[in-house]
Image (cartoon, grey):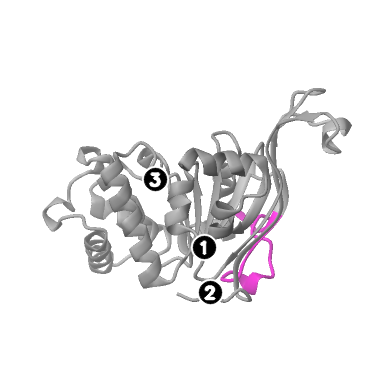
Amino acid sequence: MSLDYDAKALELRGLSKWYGPTCPRCRDGASIEKNYCTACGTVFALRDISLTLYEGEVLGVVGESGSGKSTILNCLYYDQEPSLGRAFLSSFEGGSVDIFSVSAQAKRGIRNTLLGKVYQNPVQGLKMRFSSISNVAEKLIAAGERRVSTMQARAVDLLGHVNIPSFRMKEAPEFFSGGMQQRVQIAKALSNSPPILLLDEVTTGLDQSVQAKVLDLVKQIQRELGISMLLVSHDLGVVRMLADRTAVMLGGRIVEEGLTDQILEDPQQEYTQELVHSML
């Protein structure tokens, strides 16, 4: 699909997340080595991250473990509090209000209706002993739905869409394979038709053939629904398959950003060059 680079789904400005007291030396960057302050011991998971996600776009964020990429999603989904920064959703107050500054009630509404998240570890995103239908219904209930027939119909439709067999929909995810658990997570995340889907290392730990099926499913859903996706991965092969643009992270900072094809064919930064070389 063609992208409208004037229509912003998400704007992230100056997002920082640190653990520790901070000090004057690390606040101006003088004493930071990689993402650690040698003066006071503060660890910087994110340092001044600014990103724009456009409507209908898949934006990939790639980097090694500990680079801070998953922390971006955690802050956006309110799993963690940012230390600094602002974020704006076009679907919330027309993109004019910082979603980090709103009330707890407003945050719950944003999380339950405007964002969906698929976690790297399905245990974080699913109630493993509840049925798959109940897992999808849980997010619908959180958004205010109370009609059992409506929730059941929606759950069955979504689980069918992600290829969960009908005879297994009443089973608990604890009895499913890793790939099936990720597919249930995707159905749950899509339950309220959010305009933005957050994907955190969705293929990590899966067999090669299962990875391919999950990625094909994500690609199919994005194509059919035109949903905006923020995709985090340590694997450039994953973003190559899915992402329109890619941001490369190292030590809590973005070191390179551009069209995915450009990043892969002509990387400018040494770290990106190393990543691309590792794919060959």
For marks 3 and 1, the one nearer the N-term is 3
Nearest-to-viewer mark from 3 and 1: 1
Q: Give the range drawn in magenta.
A: 86-105
- Residue shown at 22%/44% (left/top)? 172
Magenta-drawn stretch contains 87: yes
| Image location of residue 81, percent across then percent down | 63, 44
How many discs mark residues in the rendered view?
3
**Whole-number angstrom distance, CA of label 3 to CA of label 1:** 26 Å
Which corner quadrant holds the N terminus? bottom left
x 60%, y 37%: residue: 67
Q: Give the class, few, some or many, for how many residues have Cα within 10 Å of label 3's Cα (few <14, many ≥20).
A: some
**Helix or strand or loop: what does disc 3 sit on?**
helix
Residue occupying the point 71% across, 31% down = 34
Q: Earlier in the sequence, mark 2 or mark 3?
A: 2
Residue identified by numbered label 2: 3
User: The residue under label 1 is which amino acid type?
Assistant: Asp
Can residue 181 be seen here? The reply is: no
Evaluate if marks 2 and 1 touch, with contact meaning CB atoms under 8 Å apart: yes
Residue 43, x across and y down, in percent: 70, 30
Circle 1 residue: 244
Whether residue 214 is visible to the viewer of this picture, yes or no, is yes
